[in-house]
Amino acid sequence: MKLLIVDDQLATLTGLTQGIDWKSIGFNEIDTAQNAMEARISFARGIPDVMLCDIEMPVETGIDLSTWVRAQDYKTKILFLTCHSDFTYAQEAIRLGVSDYIVQPAPYHRIREKVEKAIREIAAESSHSRMADLGKTYNSRQTEIHAAMLRDLLAGTLDAATLQELPDYPDFSKDSYLVLIQLVQQTEKMRDWNENTLMTALRNTIQDTFEKKTYSSLIAFMDHHIYALAVRKNTGSFDRNELVSRLHYLESMFDMYMPCSLAFYIAGIRSAPDMKNDWVHLLRVQTTNVTGKKGVYAEQNANEKDSRYKEQFYRWNLILTNSGAEAYEKDALSILHSYTDAGTLNNTILLAFHRDFTRLMLSVKDSVDTDSIFEQSSALYTEAMHSQKAMEEMIHIFCETYASQNDNAGSSSVAATIQNYIDEHLSDNIRKEDLAELMHLNEDYLTRIFKKETGMSIKSYIIQQKMNAARELLQTTSLSVSSVAIQLGYTNFSHFSASYKKEFGITPAEEKERGK
């Protein structure tokens, strides 16, 4: 630290310099000045931490010098020395933020005490300044710090109680969901995106999906293309269907604007201390998605499924592209009203209906400006998840846009629609009767149409696609033959092996051995 002593009396300067052991209280530099000009020169050499300054000096007084010091915004602690206890001087000292006012003559030990007090003030202010800087850093990097804490919690290196000690950390002590988010189906554009860019995009989209007024959410990067989302509702209960609908909205936004798709894996409602075990479970579940299929997994518990809703997307896609927007709108409203008339329309059915509607919009985004629909009707789109009236309005807006932009739209064949469904559901046990029900067509008629358009039966196409997927898994992953069979919906291993050999001339085991 530096001490500057300013006095126009040489004897006083010498006495103050030599009469007190300044080094013992922390000063490694002691400078002197006999007037304000010399003091300014001393400031130019190095700003003093403490200045002992006489008030009564020729030309410029100590008050003039101190006024200059404050005008330069120097943080030097100033102690006035004066032979007069003039109240006017005391007032000026207060105005200038002077640390103390010492009336001479004063014993050296009293002056030392006053200076030591100033040193303690410097230390306290320095500590406060460091804390303020840390506070600014925390505030500017709060999201990243909170995310790192969540990552440490899930990794088991941080106790949950520590989280609540952080300012503004979301309270995940109850009614909170943990979601594993996996980036899947990356396009070529992903090569230009690094993890930071993806994280920013994901965080911003999540903030739009889970508004701060209603939800508390936190997203953390965990591993390559793996993220953890903790989310809770600030007031009231948080229904699982509500979470699922928000995740589907998030999924649709990524499908529209990002170079990849998302898969979601949901744990149950938990408190922060239980999230570590949930995360381990979600990681195991995620590894079963070997084909990188997008969507929300384990959307409902088995006893929550509502069998009264039948999937409409593939049928609607066919109606829209073959018969136009008016026919689709008429059909969609008819289905919605049928649930209303029967008294069975509930939140679960409306969410499933809304999900099919979203998939339909996304399926035609190359020929319809769906971006403008979302931008202009984002609030209505969100409300439609929970309101029949809003859902009907949303359908009408979409159909008007589609009709205005697709007067000469081409058609989509029944076979192409069925093929798309099969390709997206290779892990399921796909039956012809289910496909016929999905398309609302007679099973025999569907079979004839498919054979006519593709030259092969539905059964043959299903087997062909499953075997192609199996071959890719056997050649590119470490999964066992039985695991691959299970992933593709086969419960009979012999049947799977026989189908594979018929398709490729070798057994799955031989295929696996060949790749070693």
Image (cartoon, rainbow, N blue to C red):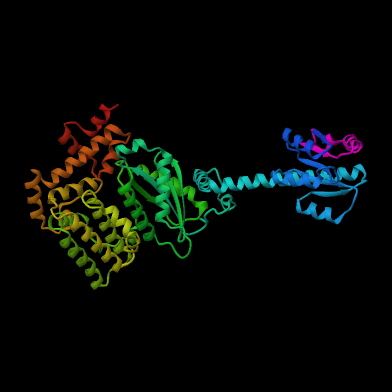
The x and y percentages for residue 96 are 76, 51
The x and y percentages for residue 308 are 25, 64
The x and y percentages for residue 213 are 46, 61
In the rendered view, would you say 257 is above or below 510? below
Q: Indicate left or right for 20 with 274 as reference.
A: right
Task: Decide if residue 309 is in sight here.
Answer: yes
Q: Indicate left or right for 393 with 287 as reference.
A: left
Near-viewer residue (313 or 56): 56
The x and y percentages for residue 272 are 51, 53
Q: Indicate left or right for 455 with 312 as reference.
A: left
Residue that lies at the very extreme toward the front in this rendered image: 59
Near-viewer residue (498 or 135): 135
Quadrant holding the C terminus: top left
Quadrant holding the N terminus: top right
In the rendered view, would you say 500 is above or below 243? above
Near-viewer residue (47 or 438): 47
User: Is residue 395 a member of the stretch shown in magenta?
Assistant: no
Write the residue at 79% across / 45% down.
78
Q: Disc count in the image?
A: 0
Magenta region, residue range: 1-28
Write the residue at 82% across / 36% down.
33
Near-viewer residue (197 or 314): 197
Task: Decide if residue 123 is in sight here.
Answer: no
Q: Indicate left or right for 326 with 281 as reference.
A: left
